[in-house]
Image: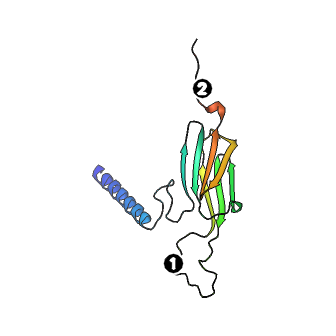
Amino acid sequence: MYGSLLNFADELFSNLDQWQRQLESRGAAANIRQVTQNTFPRISLGSTPNSVEVLAFIPDVDTKQLALEIDKNVLTLQGERVITPPSNEERATVYAQERFSGKFKRVVSLPDDVDVNHVNAIYKDGVLRISIARREETLPKRIEIQ
């Protein structure tokens, strides 16, 4: 009885591993935190003792085309990137277009201790840097012993 149960479990996990490898080979995310090959923009997310830092790599985007919002500790970045053809000539032919063009949206969950009233966003050289301060009451405090 136990042998057949263990065989069933082994077969189940083997099938799940095979299914995950098939999804990954097609560019699908292996888990909820990963992104697919076509996800735009790529981001880096990190933290310091005083803030949460988000870097979004968005080259060739006008800041007027970007919208940034934080609601219930969820950061939403959306916009549109328009890529113009390399030439304005009528006879120009594009043989390959590998750069993303169109509307995009990224959603990032933030920690509970962020202060949405203290957000700084700077776009420079194709990188949007978003710095979100942590709430002062959640920061560690040094207590002096008398």
Judged from this view, the residue extending furthest toward the top is 146
Question: At which x and y percent is residue 67?
Answer: 69, 57
Q: Quadrant of residue 101?
A: bottom right
Instruction: Residue type at mark 1: give it.
Output: Ala
Give the residue drawn at x 63%, y 74%.
84
Q: Secondary structure at mark 2?
A: loop
Label 2 Cα crowd, 10 Å radius (few <14 / some 14-19 / many 20+): few
Q: Which residue is mark 2?
A: 141
Q: Which of the pair 28/115 is nearer the observer? A: 115
Instruction: Residue type at mark 2: give it.
Output: Lys
Q: Which residue is mark 1?
A: 96
Instruction: Identify the mark nearer the N-term, 2 or 1.
Output: 1
Give the residue drawn at x 59%, y 43%.
52
Q: Which of the pair 117/127 is nearer the observer? A: 127
Give the residue drawn at x 60%, y 31%.
139
Question: At which x and y percent is residue 64?
Answer: 71, 61
Q: Specify whether 1 is left or right of 64.
A: left
Q: Secondary structure at mark 1?
A: loop
Q: Specify whether 22 is left or right of 96.
A: left
Question: At which x and y percent is residue 66?
Answer: 68, 59
